[in-house]
Amino acid sequence: MYSETCNTNILNFYRRCVLFFILLIATAAFPQRVFTNDILLKATPVKDQSYSSTCWSFATTSFIESELIRMGKGEYDLSEMFFVWNIYPKKTENYIRWHGKVFLTPGGQPHDVMKTVRTCGLVPQQAYKGKNDNSFGYDHSEMDTTIRKIANQYLAENNPRGFAKLDDTIQLVLKTYLGDPPVNFEIDHKSFTPLSFAKYLGVNPDEYPELTSYTHHPYYTAFVLETPYNWSHDLYYNLPYDDFFKTIDFALSKGFTVLWNGDVSEDEFSFDYGLALVPSKKWNDKSPIEQKNTFLINEKEIIPTPELRQQTFESLDSKVDHVMHIIGTAHDQDGKKYYIVKNSWGLNDRTGGLIYMSEAYLKLKTISIMLNKDGIPSNITNKIQWIR
């Protein structure tokens, strides 16, 4: 028995060695893609959301920072945690009002940030880092669990004390983990409140609609996008497939960055390689070598259509699980088009925290976008039935 086990272990060792050298040869034969930027708009440095489910805040904050640069206001480092502090009590109250039948998660949507800008303002990072210690990064796992337990206990007790007491409790938790946000602060040698700072910078949330493209609602009208993370039941404007993606290209060509909301659960979304692809051959149908080469060679990709987008949305194959910031376009050595997307998972990848998203991936896996109204072509803007 010992001899048989030894022989098996030796055989497995040699198999692993052979597989390693095959992958090494494959990597040498097919070097990483070389990208040439076609459009690269100004953006602030990549940040790391770390162990917090706050991509919605990081990406939207990055988007606002690029908007400030575009508007000639200068480069600012804004506080992502200021939005987390202000949104969590509202999400918790919503959870109670719906008797616990909706999501209460740390996730959110871009409009959560814009609503906070409207009602609470903006804060620079230097005035509010959003943590009570000097540890690296953010870890909200304990805070998220605590808030959910409080909300579920409130429901279980049929608490008669009202939402005021609940808000006080939630804010005490937020204070413990994030610290109190500032009432006043100084920047640019001036004194501000969060609201006066937003007014000083000229950020108008009403200028930033969210757009999507699905066939189950009339085009050019607004509807409540059916995703659990749209906890506030906000409206998204529905565009035909071609108009939707023309808008993204038009905006980038005119100097407007675009906030991206979509699905990154695919195996072909690789943070390590900084790539997002939708090859025609499914991941589970590939050998280990073919899986490795997915990120090294150009394969034929799926050809998205409005029908396929709808199918993947309804089957939940495409879902909302990440928000990122599109800041440009590029092409590789074969002339294939990609969108340059600023992520919020730090810099420990091959592309400095960026994702090069293929055109096919963008067209299939994008759920919605947010952008400045002026970044929408006028012939499309005029067709949208805007809600005043």
Image (cartoon, rainbow, N blue to C red):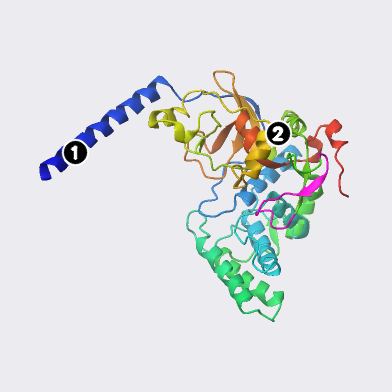
Magenta span dominant secondary structure: loop
Question: Which residue lies most toward the bottom here?
Answer: 160
Residue 311 position within the rendered picture, expressed as x and y whole percent measured from the top left: 65, 39
Residue 245 is inside the magenta segment: no
Q: Say whether residue 43 is visible.
A: no
Residue 251 position within the rendered picture, expressed as x and y whole percent measured from the top left: 75, 33
In this image, 182 relative to 292: left or right? right
Mark closest to the chain's N terminus, 1 or 2: 1
Q: Say whether residue 105 is visible.
A: yes
Query: Image height check: is 135 above or below 344?
Result: below
Q: Nearer the viewer, residue 284 or 210?
A: 284
Instruction: State the mark number for residue 306.
Output: 2
Report the span colored magenta.
219-233
Q: Quadrant of residue 19?
A: top left
Helix, strand or loop at label 1? It is: helix
- Image quarter of the N terminus: top left
Could you give the CA–CA distance between mark 1 and mark 2, rounded to whole angstroms?
Answer: 52 Å
Question: Which residue lies most toward the top here?
Answer: 334
Instruction: State the mark number for residue 8.
Output: 1
Residue 160 position within the rendered picture, expressed as x and y whole percent measured from the top left: 69, 81
Q: Quadrant of residue 303?
A: top right
Q: Residue at left 53%, top 60%?
A: 140
In this image, 241 relative to 335: left or right? right
Q: Amino acid at mark 1?
A: Thr
Helix, strand or loop at label 2? It is: helix
Q: Amino acid at mark 2?
A: Pro
Q: Nearer the viewer, residue 161 or 134?
A: 161
